[in-house]
Image (spheres, rainbow, N blue to C red):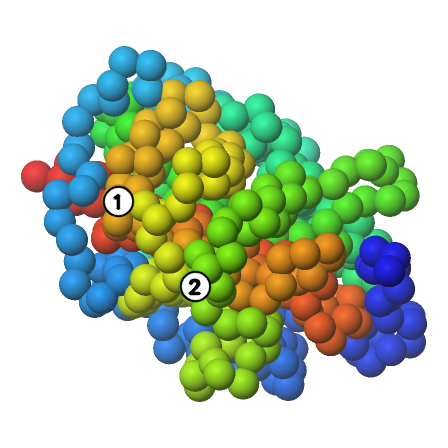
Amino acid sequence: MSTPSFRDFLFAPDHPRVADIRGLDAREYAEAAKADAFAGPMIEGWRKLYPQPFTGITSDGVRREGLYPLAPARPGEEAPTADMVAAARKLMGTVTADQAGKLCYAVDVPEWQSWANPEFMQHDTGLRLDEVAGPVRDAVLGVVEASLSPAGFQLVRNLMRINGFLGDLVELPLLMNEFSYNFALYGEPSETQPWGWQLFGHHAALNCLVAGTQLVVSPVFMGAEPDMIDAGPHQGVKVFKERIALARQLMAALPADLRDRAVVYAEMVDPAMPAGRLHPGDERHLGGCFQDNRVIPYEGIPVTDMPPGTRELLDAVVEDFIAYLPDGPRAARLREIQENYGETFFSWIGGWEGEEAFYFRVQSPVVVLELDHHTGVFLSNDQPAPFHMHTVVRTPNGNDYGRELVRQATP
């Protein structure tokens, strides 16, 4: 069987899904989406969740304390704080006074939690990159680049480019373009006190907090529809191929009895799923936007039951998920995750062979990692497909947005 191509699922230009919103800009569509049969109920559901006092994702509704001490990073695990501060100060020197007023927030405000990943603006937080001049946009991207690994920054830019590619494909460039993203700064850039930034828009949302030499980049949402660019100046861009291949290898390497126990639902849309398990926008993933206080029970198999060879594949999956972090913070995060393998669970939904769509989750007291294949939004596939995926990284028990570090740093 041939691999399905996203081009087999392009809407005709006059199809109502795209024709009815053609010509709307992001702000016009933000209003129109409220009345849309698909987006409207999703927007209303999310509206009820924001703003709520932040507690953090937990497995049982009880937040575990003491997991994230505010302390200097270990040698070799330090954040690139000086470079981040320099980039943020350059940005502040580039914007106008009016732009600075829209860009900047206090470090502990609820606007941190306003990010969303759809193409429509749920909340207009910070500056919109497709509405500012090139030097401001470049300075914003300079902050992002200074905070991530080279591979991480390249992935973010590729997701933004894929968004622009999709917008051109379906003739909706005002809604989806390379720069249809919001950016905000939180706190005063400092080498000692907590501060951070937020970038969010269609299929790319990152929340970054640095406190001295500690760095937290979480929540992170990265996705793509489609997962590649096959024409134009960025032809050849592909995303998440390695992560998906590693996940399939991990499932293939599990002994049959463990694999059976890891699969909590055999079908992506399974009759055994309880009411509410499928979300109209998030589908199977649980840690998306506005889910900051969600209770996500452990499912699947304990990582401690995995044979050593399979554990090495799990390590590779984890490393791929956190590859956006700079070298030092990535080493710290990997150590933190591996130190909690004794309380880590791995679960799966769907098939795992060939090109079958799937969902999986790695979950512990300190991390939630999710990957979910999705149905089409601007492509017409009505079944989850390997060319549309969402990925999520969360830091449960209170340290999304580095919030626990901020709490400890506040007198």
For disc 2, the neighbor class at 10 Å (few under 14, some 14 to 19, many from 20) is: some
Q: Residue at x 49, y 83 (%)?
A: 272
Q: Is residue 110 visible?
A: yes
Q: Residue at x 58, y 56 (%)?
A: 390
Report x, y in % for residue 262.
Answer: 45, 60
Label at residue 32: none
Report x, y in % for residue 150.
Answer: 57, 24
Answer left or right for 158 relative to 314.
right
Q: Is residue 370 visible?
A: no
Q: Amino acid at mark 2?
A: Arg
For disc 1, the neighbor class at 10 Å (few under 14, some 14 to 19, many from 20) is: few
Dot in front, 2 or 1: 2
Q: Residue at x 42, y 75 (%)?
A: 47
| Quadrant occupied by the C terminus | top left
The residue identified by callout 2 is 261
User: Could you tell me which secondary element the residue under label 2 belongs to?
Assistant: helix
Label at residue 342: 1
